[in-house]
Amino acid sequence: MSANTPQTLFEKLWRQHLVKELPGGVALLAIDRVFLHERTGSIALKSLREAGRAIVDPSRVFCTMDHIVDTLPGRGDDTQMPGGKAFIIETREAARAAGIHLFDVRDPDQGIVHVISPELGIVLPGTTIVCPDSHTCTQGAIGAFAWGIGSTEAEHALATGCLRMNKPKTMRVRFEGKLAAGVTAKDLSLVMISRFGSVGGNGYAVEYAGSAVEALDIEARLTLCNMATEFSAVTGFVAPDDKTFAYLQGRRFVPQASDWDRAVESWRQLRSDDGAVFDVEHVIDVSDLAPMITWGTSPQHAVQVQESVPSQAASGASEEGYARALAYMDIQPGLPLLGLKIDAAFVGSCTNSRVSDLRRAAAVLAGRQVAPGVRAICVPGSMAVKRQAEAEGLDHIFKAAGFEWRESGCSMCFFAGGESFGAHERVVSSTNRNFESRQGPETRTHIASPETVVASAIAGRIADARDLANLPVR
């Protein structure tokens, strides 16, 4: 490719970090940031130490307690996951010995890795950032090349500052049109995955663009990029713009003073050139999009909330997969989703636990109460989000409505042997995955936006937050 050939943003990021082309179509890439958490961090750090290898640059390595840490008020090192305390203690000891940045259980900056990295300015436009967590692509919303890796790859990145990688193909998904009131970035993700399938992004680096994406704030873009994982993409990202720079300015780890001005000048070049060619392009008109919700056991099993369970032919699932999803979720073709009785509601996760998510949910909840028999939980994505929400009085709204108000962490986004929802309980959740037993053994999960989650909690049944006038005030 000549210097004058129009380039995609991904091509620019790739070239800026290319160390060497290796045989077999593999490349060696420079890694700017490594983020660890307590579920895998202790493993990577311990293995590195036992091998007698040092971290090449500890200042570029970060670690948080988020996956296993308890979220109940007054928490400490004890967790509800069997053996979880050992993960926390071992990660703490290994992180301190390695001299890396640690956001411990009681640290005021503790939180879910993909929430605190942007809010602290750890991820920056144009950087490469990796973490042993599949939803690392969330951070592509800042204009970074971010992807999830395994513990062995984490060891390699820690010791060398580089990783081997096969170059992904490029895809651009353009969301065009103005979103209607009550329609969110979560709905953009779900409509894309339902339309093109849960493997539609397999092997691709996906750039999100179009007028609807440009109109999103940064926290909404983080939600959109988060679910590139459920699209099976290598990563998802949005070109940085003035919104990005305004969001980052003044945060803890961003360049300061004159360095900031030089950084922004450089970041402004991080966009796909006019005429750049992508391997695949999709355009989705979102003008008539309504809130989405899943009916089955894959994010691609999603429809607009006022629709019914589709037929097998319209479901995007194989005959076997369709029948299994129906049986697991205890539903039938043609069943309206609105009005389906629920047992629990969850607001949280790296997808939808930022302060903007909690503000929108609280606006729906204000003056109302959770229906009898529904367990409702809200888990802020970071301690900074929790403090901000409490400063705005959002916690009072959640608690007055009947929600549990927690400390920050991944919590009931996934079941790892600790706290969970019950067998056969139907949960409406702001998380990103709904496969069998994701939130507990035999728990049935419907994923949706925070607004749909809290509206359903109030109604005691799957509900559309836009029908607020028809929801009871208790």
Image (cartoon, grey):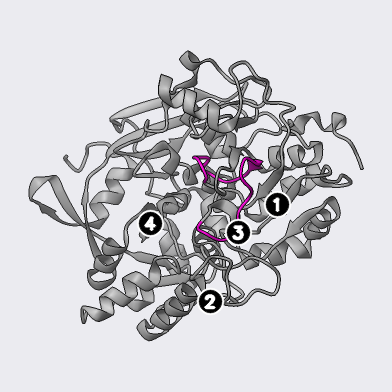
Tag 2's secondary structure? loop
Q: Magenta includes 431? A: yes
Q: Nearer the viewer, mark 3 or mark 2?
A: 3
Q: Residue 134: horizontal and vertical position, in percent?
A: 40, 51
Corner quadrant of residue 31: bottom left
Left or right position of 109 against 198: right
Amino acid bearing label 3: Glu
- 10 Å crowding of disc 4: few (<14), some (14-19), many (20+): few
Q: Which residue is mark 3?
A: 419
Placement of 422 over or under 80, stated as above or below: above
First in sequence, mark 4 or 1: give its number: 4
First in sequence, mark 4 or 3: give its number: 4
The N terminus - image quarter? top left
First in sequence, mark 1 or 2: give its number: 2
Q: Which residue is mark 2?
A: 104
Secondary structure mostly seen in magenta is loop
Q: Which residue is mark 4?
A: 266
Q: Are marks 3 and 2 in contact (CB under 8 Å)?
A: no
Placement of 193 over or under 131, stated as above or below: above
The magenta segment is 416-437
First in sequence, mark 3 or 2: give its number: 2
Amino acid bearing label 1: Leu
